[in-house]
């Protein structure tokens, strides 16, 4: 399974890759040295907008230079370059933790807006195993934050 580490300019891309199920390390304030170290230690492919970083010896052969400034185009580039598919193991867009299905939606009754609760099936909710953030159907496919109604983009 492909694992990634995204540079500081690629936060949106990192979140979308996580929702697709890909283990993607991202830290807003990471230095190049730390990024290279983590990439090597954890066998992660580097995604970067930084041509200087891509030229570093430690990055050679295991980094992809992201061309576009537009997150949607960035995602398209990564998907096409690595032939990625949406995995059935979505991850938390906030912290990269694995999502676990909530066994009974009654458990989240008080945690989500009423219309969300009413319009989602018994097994329509998942929770991040690490940070506890709650997701529901529709917050995966669109790759958009989960605190919105299902009518969101
Ligand atoms: Zn989380």
Image (tube, rainbow, N blue to C red):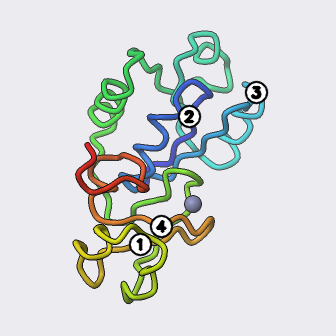
* Residue found 60% across the figure and 29% down from its top: 7
**What is the CA distance from the residue labelled 4 to the residue labelled 3?**
30 Å
Q: Which circle's residue, 2 or 3, is located before the other in the chain? A: 2
Q: Which disc number belongs to residue 134?
A: 4
Q: Which circle's residue, 2 or 1, is located before the other in the chain? A: 2
Residue of label 1: 126
* Classed neighbour count for the residue bearing mark 1: other residues with Cα under 10 Å, few (<14), some (14–19), many (≥20): many
**What is the CA distance from the residue labelled 2 to the residue labelled 4?**
24 Å
Percent coordinates x, y for residue 139 in the rendering: 33, 56
Residue of label 3: 31
Q: Is residue 143 above or below residue 107?
A: above
Query: Are the residues at dot 4 and dot 3 in contact (C-beta closer than 8 Å)?
Result: no
Q: In the drawing, does residue 152 fall left or right of residue 22?
A: left
Q: Give SS at disc 3.
A: loop
Query: Are the residues at dot 4 and dot 1 in contact (C-beta closer than 8 Å)?
Result: yes
Mark 2 or 4, closer to the camera: 4
**What is the CA distance from the residue labelled 1 to the residue labelled 3?**
33 Å
**What is the CA distance from the residue labelled 2 to the residue labelled 1?**
25 Å
């Amino acid at each position: 399974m492909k694992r990634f580490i995204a540079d500081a300019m690629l936060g949106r891309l990192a979140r979308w890759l996580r929702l697709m199920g890909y283990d993607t390390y991202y830290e807003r304030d990471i230095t190049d040295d730390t990024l290279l170290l983590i990439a090597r230690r954890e066998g992660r492919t580097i995604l970067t907008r930084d041509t200087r970083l891509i030229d570093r010896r430690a990055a050679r052969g295991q980094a992809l230079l992201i061309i576009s400034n537009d997150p949607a185009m960035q995602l398209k580039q990564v998907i096409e370059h690595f032939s990625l598919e949406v995995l059935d193991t979505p991850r938390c867009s906030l912290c990269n933790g694995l999502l676990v299905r909530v066994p009974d939606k009654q458990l989240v009754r008080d945690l989500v807006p009423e219309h969300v609760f009413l319009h989602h099936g018994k097994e329509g909710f998942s929770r991040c195993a690490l940070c506890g953030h709650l997701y529901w159907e529709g917050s995966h496919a669109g790759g958009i934050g989960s605190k919105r109604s299902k009518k969101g983009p």
